[in-house]
Image (spheres, coloured by chain):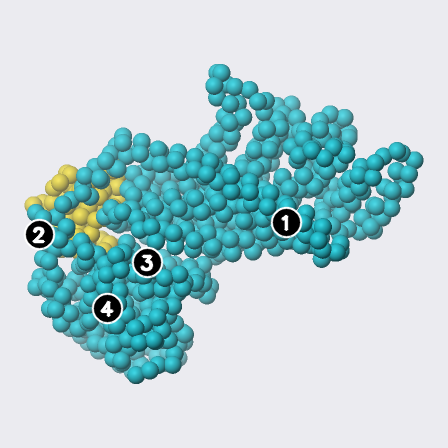
Chain colours: A yellow, B cyan
Amino acid sequence: MNTIATLRIGETGIISEESLDVIPLKLLEMGCLPGTEVELLQIAPLKDPLYICVNGSHLAIRKEMAAQIKIIKN
Amino acid sequence: MERSKPIQVALIGNPNTGKTSLFNQLTGLNQKVGNYPGVTVDKKQGICKLLNNQTAIITDLPGTYSINPTSVDESIVLKSLLTTEDENYPDVIVVVADIENLKRNLFLFSQVKDLEIPIILAINMADQLDRKGISIDVETLQKELKTETILISARKNGGIDKVKTAIVNCVEISKAHPLCSLNHKIDEDYFERLKEVSENHTLYELWLMVTQNNLPDSLSEIEKQKLLEFRQDVSKLKRYQHKETIHRYQQINEILKRTYIVDRSKAKDLRAKLDRVFTHKIFGYVIFFGILLLIFQSIFDWASAPMDFIDSAFANLSTLIKGELAPGVLTNLIADGIIPGIGGVVIFIPQIAILFLFVAILEETGYMSRVVFLMDKIMRRYGMSGKSVIPLISGTACAIPAVMATRTISGWKERLITILVTPFTTCSARLPVYAILISLVIPDKKLLGYFSLQGFTLLCLYALGFATAIVSAFLLHKIIKVKSTSFFVAEMPNYKIPSFKNIVFNVIEKTKAFVFGAGKIILAISIVLWFLASNGPASYKNAEKNIVENSVNFNISAEELQHKIAASKLENSYIGIMGKTIEPAIKPLGYDWKIGIALISSFAAREVFVGTLATIYSVESGSDNTSTIKEKMRVEVNPETGKKTFTLPVGMSLLIFYAFAMQCVGTLAVVKRETKSWKWPLAQLFGMGILAYVAAFVTFTIFS
C-alpha cells in the first residue's frame, strides 16, 4: 500500500478518495485533498517531517500523518 | 454619499500573503496595537485616508488559512466576522491573496464571501507574474467570483489607490452574494432546516455557529436551542465540513481553470535550490547554528553600549531629581521607586529590539519555516515541536514575548511544555547578575592561555540554561498526561527578500508591546519594593536617632554616618525584616539576610538584584566616593564569620540559584494568561524554586 510516506523525493502520486476520513480538516483546507496530485519535495535530515507540495501549497507534515494518507503512485 | 462615520475595513488573508504590507501601505504610521478582550492577541488597527476625504479604520486580522479556527489567533478572525454588534464589525472586507497560492487563498475567500459582507479581493505580488510564469484573466475572474478583484503589489505601492477606491465603492453595495451554495451537494434537507432557524443570519453564518459552537448574544434563546440540536451528531458535522471543503475547492478549480494559467517552464525555481541548501543534513544545521551565534553575539555586543547609556542616564536622572525637587516622600518615590523602575524596563529595549529584528528578518525571508522543518524531529524527542525553537531563542532576550510566541504551536501538550521550560533559557535579566557575580568570584585568568575563565563560566551558564530546558522538557514529556488531538502542519512559504518597512514596523510594534505589557508589572513591583524598603515599624523610624546617639562618641565623618543610618534603616524596614525572616532558610545556601533581600526583590525582575545590593552595601566602604557596586560587594564582610561575604562557594551558589529559580512576576503573569490557569505558573514557581534551592545547596556544599 502506498502512502505519502512511501514516496521517494521527486515522486508524485494522487491522494486516494478513501483517505478523506483520515485527513484532518485543517490539512484539507490547506489543499491536501483526495484526488489531487502530491509531490514529495524533501525529507528532513532525521527522516521526518516530510516536505510536500499539493495543490500549489508547500507544506511540512510529520511522517505519522503522511503514513495515513493513501495515494496511487504516478 | 457622505458618511459621517469612518468605514470599518477588515483585512483577511493567509499568512505570508503580504497582508501586513498592504496594511502598512494603507495606514502608514497611523497604527495602534490594542488587545482583543479576554485574550492577549494583538489587535492591529490603523486609520486610512480614502480618496474622497472619507476615512477608514483598517483592522489587520491575524493570518489564517480558514475561518474554522484551530488557534487563539484564528478564533479572533471568526469572532470578528460573527459579532455584528461589535464597533469594528466590518462594513467592507478586503481579502488579500497571493498570486502564487491563489487556489488556497481563494478557499478562504470563498468562506468569507459566503458571509455576505461587502468584499474586495486584492491579489498581491502582481509584479511577479512574469517571473513565476503566471497569466491571469482578472476580468473573467471578477465575474466568476462576483467580486471586485484588484491586482496589487503591496511592497511597491502598486494598486493601493485602486484598493482605496474599491473600498468606497464597495460600501455603497449593501448586500453581497454568496459564492458557494452549501446545501445542494452535501445534504439539501439538512441545510434547508438550518436556514429556517433564523432570518437575521445567512446560512453560512448559522453553519459556522453550529460547527464552531459559537452562539452570539444576538440570537434568541429558541434559536440557540435549535442550533444546539444541530450539534448533536458531531461525526456528521465533521463529515459535512470535509464535504464542504472539497465542494469549495471543486468550485474554485472550475473558476481557475478558465482564468489562471501557470507555465511551469517559465517559472524559475529558486525555492528548490535554496531548500536544498537550507535543509541539507549538514549545511542546514551549520547555517542554523551560525545564525544563532550571530544573534547571540549581536544581542550582547551591539546592545551593550546603548544599555550602558540607558543605565547611566536613568541613574543621572534620579540624582538630578533628588537635587532639583524638594526632599520628601514624593521625591523619593520618583527618584528611588519610579525612575529606577522605568529604567529597569527601558534597559532591555536594545536587546529585545535586536532580537526581534533577527526574528522578523528570519520570518519575513521564509527561513524560519526551514528551521522548524530541520528541528522538528529533534525537538519532538523532548515533547516539543519544531515550532518551539522560536520561543526558545526568544527566551534568551526575555521569556515574556517567548511565551507569547508559543501560540503558533498547534499541539497543546507541545505548547505547554515549551511554555514551562522557556524560563530556563538565560534571559537578559540574568545577565547583569551573572556579570557581577562572575567578576567577583571567578579569577580573571586565561584557560589554556587563550580563553578567559570568566567568559567560559558565562558560556557554561548559558549552556546550563539550555540543557536544563531540554532535560526538564524530556521529564515533563514523560510526566504530563494531556490529551492533545491536534497535529503538526507547517507551511513552507517561498523565499522573499524582506521588506525594510515591514521589519521596522514589526520591531517597533513588538518592542512597544513588551515595554507596555511587561513594563507595567515590573514598574508596579518596583514601586512596591521601594515602599517596603523605605517604610517600616517603629524600629525603622527610630533607626536614625539610635545611630546618631550611638555614634556620638566615635569620630566618624558625616558621610560615614549617613551610610550607617541608611544601612540601619534598611535593616529595620519591612523588606529588611522579610530578609531577616527568610535568613534561616537561605543560610544553608551560604546567604545572609542582605542577599535574602536581594532574592526577594528579584521577584520583580532578576536584574533588580544588582540594584538592591548596591543600596544595601552602601556601607563600610565609607567616604571613598569612587567605589562601584562591585567594589562594595568585594569588601563586604559577613559580621558573624568575619570573612568576606562573596566567596567562591557563595558566588557559585548564587549563580546556580539564579540560573534555575523562577524569579519573574511578568513571566508568571503571562503564563497564567496563556494557559488560562494558575496551575501551570504555580508549578513553574515551585518546581523551579525547589530545583534552584537544591542545586544551590549542592553547589555551595561542593565548593566549600
**Chain of the residue under label 4:** B
Tell me whether the residue at label 3 lies in contact with that at label 2, contact meaning CB atoms closer than 8 angstroms. no
Label 3 secondary element: helix
As measured in the structure, the alpha-carbon distance from the residue carrying label 3 to the one carrying label 2 is: 29 Å
Decide which of B548, B324 is in the foreground and name it.
B324
Label 4 secondary element: helix
**Chain of the residue under label 1:** B
- Looking at the image, is mark 1 or mark 3 nearer the viewer? 1
Residue A64 screen position, x and y as percent: 25, 44
Q: Mark 1 points at which residue?
A: B317
Above or below, B206 relative to B435: below
Q: Name the residue under label 3.
A: B20
| Residue at 55 percent of width and 49 percent of height | B345
The quadrant where residue B298 appears: top left
The quadrant where residue B632 appears: top right
Q: In terms of sequence position, does the residue under pointer 2 or pointer 4 come before the other? A: 4
Q: Name the residue under label 4.
A: B162
Please give the label number shown on residue B72. Answer: none
